[in-house]
Amino acid sequence: MKIAAIQQHSLIDYPGLISCVIFTYGCNFRCWYCHNHWLVLPSAGCKQIDTDSVFNFLAERVGWLDGVVISGGEPTLHPDLPTFIKQIKQFGFRVKLDTNGTNPKMVEHLIDASLVDYVAMDIKALPTAGNYSKVIGVADSDIIELVKKSIAVLQKSQIEYQFRITWPSDKPKSEIDEIEQVLNGCKLHVNELTLENGILADYLTF
């Protein structure tokens, strides 16, 4: 696992639980509004936290924390994610995964193996060709089907899950209704981007 940072305490990242947040390096998207852009393309020699340090930290937090959130970046890019979570589970913590939904096989495996208790999946736009690429900054021809498969995996599962979206304040809310139809009526959790004169102050370029 390429671990970039640990937020030692959070009251908001795992609904209803006191948690810590583990941030992983690397992402297959280039979203222009990304608030964790420093994780997307880690520079050579970037600081990493070794897994032993993570487990030592968690051992000290048993009884103080309820859950662990694994975020990024995109955690499912790491093939050793299941092994990493198994070790976290040994401490008795509940585990929440934040994902963009582009690795449905990994998500399904984690659910089937009872390694995750909650999944928050980011929906970037209406999942049709062309819409996604405008947001994620990469071609979306294959990604659309992967995202749809992840949606289906979550909706047939028995775990807690949430679909969420980041939405510019000047964009019509009617489009959210269209996305919720694709989600079979499931409500989106909307994080609104506040724009000044139609421009986001922290606009990113990759």
Image (cartoon, rainbow, N blue to C red):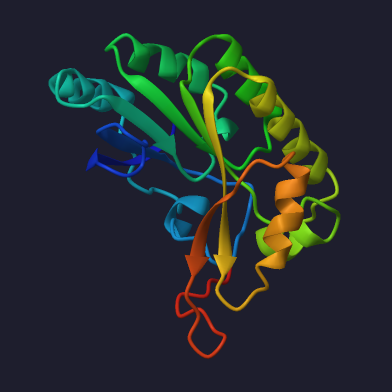
The quadrant holding residue 11 is top left
Q: Residue 178: where, in percent of width, then height?
A: 76, 56
Q: Nearer the viewer, residue 26 or 44?
A: 26
Residue 126 occupies quadrant: bottom right
Residue at point 22% right, 23% down? 58
Residue 74 vertical position relative to residue 53 in the rendered view, above or below: below
- Residue 180 can be seen in this image: yes
Give how far across and how far down residue 50 sits, in percent: 31, 29
If the image is split into quadrants, where does the C terminus sit? bottom right
Left or right: residue 41 compared with residue 67 = right
- The residue lying at 73 percent from left, 52 percent from top is 179
Q: Position of residue 68 (x, y in %)?
A: 33, 28
| Residue in the foreground of this view, choosing between 130 and 119 | 119
Q: Position of residue 35 (x, y in %)?
A: 44, 60
Residue 8 vs residue 121, the one in the foreground: 121
From where the camera sits, is residue 41 visible? no
Residue 2 in the image: above or below residue 153: below
